[in-house]
Image (tube, helix red, strand yellow):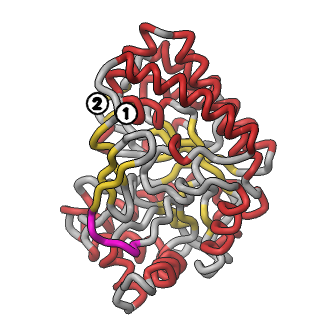
Amino acid sequence: MTKLQRVLHTFDQGSIDRLTIYDKIHNVELIEHVTGTKLTEKNAEDVTCTALGKLCDMVRHVAIPCRLDEYTLKDGDGFIYRVSWYTKDIIQRPFNSEDGARELVKRDIDRMKACIEKEQYCPELSWHLQLFGEDLVYPEDLNSEFRRIQEKMDGTIMVAPEFFDGIGPLSNRYDYTYFIYLLYDYPELMGELLDAYIDYQLFRIESFDSTLTPVALISTAIAGTSGLMYSPEFIRREYFPRMQVLHQRLKQKGYHVIVESDGDNRVIFEDFIRAGIEAYTPLERTSHMHIEEIKKQYPALVLCQEIESTHLLPFGTIEEVIEETKKVIALAEIYGGVFIGSCGDIHPRVRLENALAMYDTARQHCFS
């Protein structure tokens, strides 16, 4: 089967020749190993794309390790970031009070409206995780860059640039504590902000060339390993209606849609099902989200990224990784609708031998 056929058949719960591999690769040692090439600033893009083509049927969060040192960056709003080649963290915000955060919210609402009118992106309002194309301003540049990179991957499917309901990136931008204060003290303003963000995401959906990939993803941050970060009532009121707007628009555009929500979402998982989602990621054992339980209860739901990348892949044995991979293979043979990959990403601390054990085991097991 081709990679595209494998991906589409997995979404459709159809027959496949082997388990479909879907992951995020952020490990230079793995990239160099599978290509047999020492990575340099000049060859980083080609070597990384070659590695992704060899390892995966589908990928997202494609980052190119052309600069391996960690550095700080200050943007025009005064945010200071700690940047590495595959991730980015805010280390200082340009405000230290609720009033300061509120003024930034007002400016951001106006900025989103202006960007939609001008048909431009707002790099300032990205999630700032080194996601693909997050610094680009013009839709035509994003489409061109996406096409160019994907064509270097030997048929591997790139998931469309990620779309967000707003809660994840905005709670990160304004600081989680101030975000909560603002929701409580200025509910109308924050409702306007979240609605403006959805309008902006709808513009992003419309401006991206849907012929470039059959798969899209909606990402959020509403839970941690110990449970929800907000009340179930808040999530049902503020998250699900907005997520469904995005989900429906993406389905209308012809995409298969994955919904990503890290952490322990067991309390609201039935709400995801009622919302009519097609696919869900990730399944983190550290968050008590076990693929065996969820797949048995919801066999029609497509599930992605189940191999634990906080402890097992960095610190486990090869035998343990193979055992976990075989469990996923067995579920896929029974139910279908399973993509295999790390529950987070193949980050720099993941052992090369363990990553290879997961991929090789999945690739070598042929389905009848």
Report the span colored magenta. Answer: 65-70
315 versus 166 height, above or below:
below
Our reading of the magenta stretch's main secondary structure is loop
Dot 2 alpha-carbon crowd within 10 angstroms: few under 14, some 14 to 19, many 20 or more: few
Residue topped by disc 1: 264
Dot 2 amino acid type: Ser
Q: Is residue 267 left or right of residue 92?
A: right
Q: Nearer the viewer, residue 329 or 140?
A: 140
Q: Is residue 122 left or right of residue 220?
A: right
The answer to whether residue 68 is magenta is yes
140 versus 121 height, above or below:
below
* Residue name at image x 54 percent, y 78 percent: 53
Q: Are marks 1 and 2 in contact (CB under 8 Å)?
A: yes
Residue topped by disc 2: 226
* Residue name at image x 35 percent, y 54 percent: 73
Q: Nearer the viewer, residue 344 or 323?
A: 344
Looking at the rendered structure, the secondary structure element under dot 2 is loop
The picture quadrant where one finds residue 243 is top right
Looking at the rendered structure, the secondary structure element under dot 1 is loop
Dot 1 alpha-carbon crowd within 10 angstroms: few under 14, some 14 to 19, many 20 or more: many
Mark 1 and mark 2 lie on one chain; the one further toward the N terminus is: 2
